[in-house]
Image (cartoon, rainbow, N blue to C red):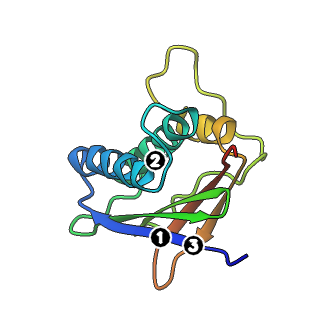
Amino acid sequence: MPVTVRVFTQRFSSTPRGARLARRLALHQLDAWGVPHGSEASDTAALIVAELAANAVTHGRIPGRDFEVTLKLLGRTLRIEVSDARGERRPLASGAPGPTPRPLAETGRGMLLVEALADRWDVLDRVPVGKTIVAELDLPR
């Protein structure tokens, strides 16, 4: 049986509006691929894209540089990649101990959510500059 790989890649402005648009277009693409709006997989992917896009805009922004979202549907695995131009500001690797946000803090929980929601995630170097955060979801049959 041949394996079909579906790929969606789009660049967005490093603004809150760009982050919102990334989430909306990701949901639209997933629906087109048969991951329906409102399903658990769609909702989980939306949260991951939203958090990673918000981080790219907040922590990875370099004026005049966009961030990029790539979705790859590889069989029953959804791979979400969010790349930005700032390589020196990196979250700690999956499972690494890090600072715990204060209980009433308004920031600092994005990667904790990604850790909780994704089946796997990692931080990769981006060529020629920057980083890519990769999160994978195992989709139900």
Helix, strand or loop at label 3? It is: strand
Q: Which residue is mark 1?
A: 7
Q: Which residue is mark 2?
A: 49
Q: Which mark is residue 5?
A: 3
Q: Tell me the kind of residue under disc 1.
A: Val
Bin the neighbour count of mark 2 within 10 Å (Cα to Cα): few under 14, some 14-19, many 20 and up: many
The CA distance from mark 1 to mark 2 is 15 Å
Q: Residue at x 73, y 50 (%)?
A: 94
Q: Tell me the kind of residue under disc 2.
A: Val
Tell me: 62 left or right of 120. left
Q: Position of residue 98 (x, y in %)?
A: 70, 40
Residue with the most extreme top position? 104
Helix, strand or loop at label 2? It is: helix
Question: Badges 3 and 2: C-beta atoms under 8 Å apart?
Answer: no
Question: Badges 1 and 2: C-beta atoms under 8 Å apart?
Answer: no
Q: Position of residue 37 (x, y in %)?
A: 42, 37
Please tell me whether residue 16 is drawn above or below residue 126 in the rendered image.
Answer: above
Q: Position of residue 53 (x, y in %)?
A: 40, 50
Question: Badges 3 and 1: C-beta atoms under 8 Å apart?
Answer: yes
